[in-house]
């Protein structure tokens, strides 16, 4: 992306550091595709950046507690209200849905996508490793990426239902689960693009290119 005088500009991306997520590997991957990246829990930085990334590993309930503690629930809502880009990764994607159910416990998510996150039905759980992903034609996150490319997953839970108005990519067992989803300024991937080699870097590059 270029500035008004034709010079390339650095894009300011904040990777939210709220205690859950591979923040340094996400930072390195985004820097590799040309973003100027800060890892921070500062609300002002998260509110004012070009793009905000919410990573996540571990339990849905713990991630939600961490997000709430640093005020990121409000920041994400504020950003999306003005169409400022947000990218969720792994559990950072799951918390964008209304509800997460783990071990019989139900936790309310951020609710920006309708539906619930539940245990995946796969031969092995956790689902760990490379799996193919099939996406809606024209989905900007996957521009230029070969159809049914493989991405790297580490998870036991995911969303399984269509979401009104959203472009969705699918993977997994029976039923398939949402591997990636985007609507408006909000995008999310159940897989780890920062661990998905060239395909993951291409996806992150596509997201960065769409930043305002």
Image: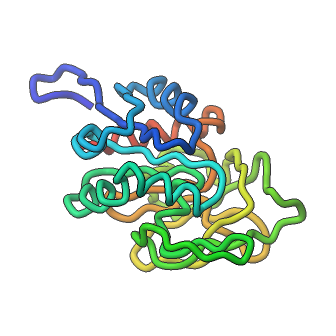
Residue 32: where, in percent of width, then height? Answer: 48, 23
Residue 63: where, in percent of width, then height? Answer: 54, 55
On screen, 89 above or below 178?
Answer: above
Quick check: 29 left or right of 158? left
Q: Which of 165 and 126 is in front in this view?
A: 126
Quick check: 41 left or right of 5? right
Q: Which of 7 and 110 is in front in this view?
A: 110
Residue drawn at 38 percent across, 49 percent down: 70
In this figure, which colouring scheme has been used for the structure?
rainbow
- The residue sitting at the top extreme is 7
- The residue sitting at the front extreme is 69
Q: Which of 207 and 73 is in front in this view?
A: 73
On screen, 119 above or below 187?
Answer: below
Residue drawn at 52 percent across, 65 percent down: 136
Residue 163: where, in percent of width, then height? Answer: 48, 77
Quick check: 87 left or right of 212? right
Residue drawn at 42 percent across, 72 percent down: 111
Residue 110: where, in percent of width, then height? Answer: 42, 67
Quick check: 138 left or right of 135? left
Counting labels gives 0
- The residue sitting at the right extreme is 123
The quadrant of the image that shows the C terminus is: top left
On screen, 181 above or below 189?
Answer: below
The quadrant of the image that shows the N terminus is: top left
């Amino acid at each position: 992306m270029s500035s008004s005088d034709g010079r390339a500009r650095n894009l300011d991306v904040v990777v939210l550091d709220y205690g859950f997520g591979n923040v340094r590997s996400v930072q390195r991957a985004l820097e590799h595709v040309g973003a100027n990246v800060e890892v921070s829990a500062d609300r002002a930085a998260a509110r004012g950046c070009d793009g905000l990334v919410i990573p996540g590993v571990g339990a849905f309930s713990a991630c939600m507690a961490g997000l709430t503690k640093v005020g990121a629930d409000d920041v994400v809502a504020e950003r999306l209200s003005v169409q400022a880009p947000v990218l969720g990764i792994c559990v950072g994607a799951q918390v964008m849905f209304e509800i997460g159910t783990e071990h019989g416990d139900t936790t309310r998510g951020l609710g920006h996508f309708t539906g619930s996150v539940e245990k995946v039905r796969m031969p092995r759980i956790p689902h760990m490793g490379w799996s193919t992903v099939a996406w809606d034609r024209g989905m900007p996150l996957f521009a230029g990426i070969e159809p049914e490319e493989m991405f790297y997953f580490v998870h036991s839970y995911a969303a399984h239902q269509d979401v009104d108005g959203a472009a969705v990519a699918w993977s997994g067992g029976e039923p398939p689960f949402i591997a990636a989803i985007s609507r408006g300024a909000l995008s999310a991937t159940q897989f780890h693009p920062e661990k998905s080699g060239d395909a993951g870097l291409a996806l992150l590059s596509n997201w960065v290119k769409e930043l305002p």
